[in-house]
Image (tube, rainbow, N blue to C red):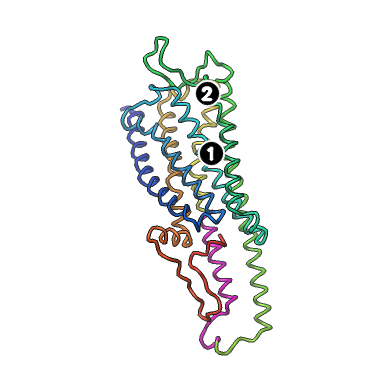
């Protein structure tokens, strides 16, 4: 009994896309509400997260093109080649921008860890916005070739429908660029280079945090051996303000490290498989141009990997907010309109705010 991979792919991808839309649009909307507040916009990290939520929403909207084809058999590419070019252009630009927002967030976090004092002038909302804007312009230039007439053809000239395929016979040079050269550039810009920046920054952060923690422990041990403990503090079990500050800093670093680690792991797990598939398919297509179309299983595999890739754009809010107590507190405060309540240390010498975002 043969398997109808086309029907099976339609059913599986329809379920995946529906889950993506339910979780993605709700989560990214909450992210917009959280990171667009006046207090959050004063932090550079929040600027990256705000633009990330916008990019994820646009990426999910562009995936409706595939969802309508899989779920309702509505091939939008048959209605307008120009609309197809616009969709492809915006899809690639905002998917790339999403990757680079995560990389920018990792780099911002690295600068804050490496240069605690200098980061106050480097890691500003203005610089973050400028970096994102320049990145957006570069990505628009890189993906601008999708408006080429070498892709798609409108109705007319004895054609009742449009198409969004490559015009191989009319534009052979562009066809060669699109099939042989462009996949390598796209994978480098979309996946491999941002992933390298994320991994490198997080590795550097881990090394810096461990080195700083070791230095603080040695410093505290030397001071404790020289400074006698207050008898009342000893009896009451109240830690010193400096020790409490160190504990708070360590907890904050653990939260940010967990958030960034989850970011990198999810990004790699959901984008690398489809990237590797495209590289393998490129090598096979050189010998057999219609290899994917003639092999239903390979087309089925690509559709599954592509739909799973879009899970990345629906999970950002849950990774960056719900895995960190700081951002979770800010989110709860935003939707409930609560005021910030300061939490005082037991000795009343130092006050802490639950969502101390200036350190993020």
Q: Are marks 1 and 2 in contact (CB under 8 Å)?
A: no
Residue wearing tag 1: 96
Along the viewing direction, whichever of 244 and 54 lies nearer the viewer:
54
Residue wearing tag 2: 285
Residue 62: % across, % down = 43, 35
The quadrant the N terminus occupies is: top left
Please say if 321 is above or below 234. above
Q: Which residues are magenta?
A: 233-260
Residue 184: % across, % down = 59, 31
Residue 317: % across, % down = 44, 51
The quadrant the C terminus occupies is: bottom right
Residue 87 occupies quadrant: top left
Alpha carbon of mark 1 to alpha carbon of mark 2: how far? Answer: 25 Å
Residue at (47, 46) in percent of width and height:
53
Along the viewing direction, whichever of 207 and 136 lies nearer the viewer:
136
Element at badge 2?
A: helix
Residue at (48, 30) in percent of width and height:
88
Marking on residue 23: none
Residue at (60, 54) in percent of width and height:
124
Mark 2 Cα shell of 10 Å, populated few (<14), some (14-19), many (≥20): some
Mark 1 Cα shell of 10 Å, populated few (<14), some (14-19), many (≥20): many
Question: Mark 1 or 2 closer to N-term?
Answer: 1
């Amino acid at each position: 009994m043969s398997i109808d991979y086309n029907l099976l792919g339609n059913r599986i991808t329809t379920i995946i896309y529906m889950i993506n839309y339910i979780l993605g649009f709700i989560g990214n909307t909450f992210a917009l509400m959280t990171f667009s507040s006046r207090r959050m916009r004063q932090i550079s990290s929040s600027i990256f997260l705000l633009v990330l939520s916008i990019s994820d929403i646009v990426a999910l909207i562009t995936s409706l093109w595939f969802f309508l084809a899989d779920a309702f058999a509505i091939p939008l590419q048959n209605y307008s080649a120009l609309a197809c070019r616009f969709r492809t252009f915006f899809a690639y630009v905002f998917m790339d921008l999403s990757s680079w927002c995560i990389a920018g967030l990792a780099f911002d976090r690295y600068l804050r860890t490496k240069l605690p004092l200098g980061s106050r002038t480097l890691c500003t909302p203005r610089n973050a916005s400028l970096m994102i804007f320049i990145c957006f312009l570069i990505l628009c230039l890189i993906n601008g070739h999708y408006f080429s007439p070498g892709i798609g053809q409108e109705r007319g000239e004895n054609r009742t429908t449009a198409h969004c395929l490559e015009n191989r016979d009319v534009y052979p040079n562009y066809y060669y660029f699109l099939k042989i050269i462009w996949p390598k550039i796209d994978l480098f810009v979309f996946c491999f280079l941002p992933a390298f920046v994320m991994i490198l920054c997080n590795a550097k952060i881990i090394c810096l945090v461990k080195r700083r923690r070791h230095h603080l422990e040695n410093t505290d041990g030397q001071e404790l051996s020289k400074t006698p403990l207050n008898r009342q503090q000893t009896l009451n079990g109240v830690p010193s303000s400096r020790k409490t500050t160190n504990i708070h800093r360590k907890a904050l670093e653990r939260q940010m490290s967990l958030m960034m680690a989850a970011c990198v792991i999810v990004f790699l797990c959901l984008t690398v498989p489809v990237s590797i598939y495209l590289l393998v398919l490129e090598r096979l297509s050189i010998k057999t141009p219609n290899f994917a179309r003639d092999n239903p299983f390979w087309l089925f595999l690509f559709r599954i990997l592509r739909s799973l890739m879009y899970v990345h754009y629906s999970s950002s809010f849950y990774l960056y907010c719900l895995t960190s107590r700081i951002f979770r507190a800010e989110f709860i405060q935003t939707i409930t309109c609560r005021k910030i309540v300061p939490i005082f240390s037991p000795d009343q010498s130092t006050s802490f705010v639950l969502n101390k975002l200036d350190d993020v």
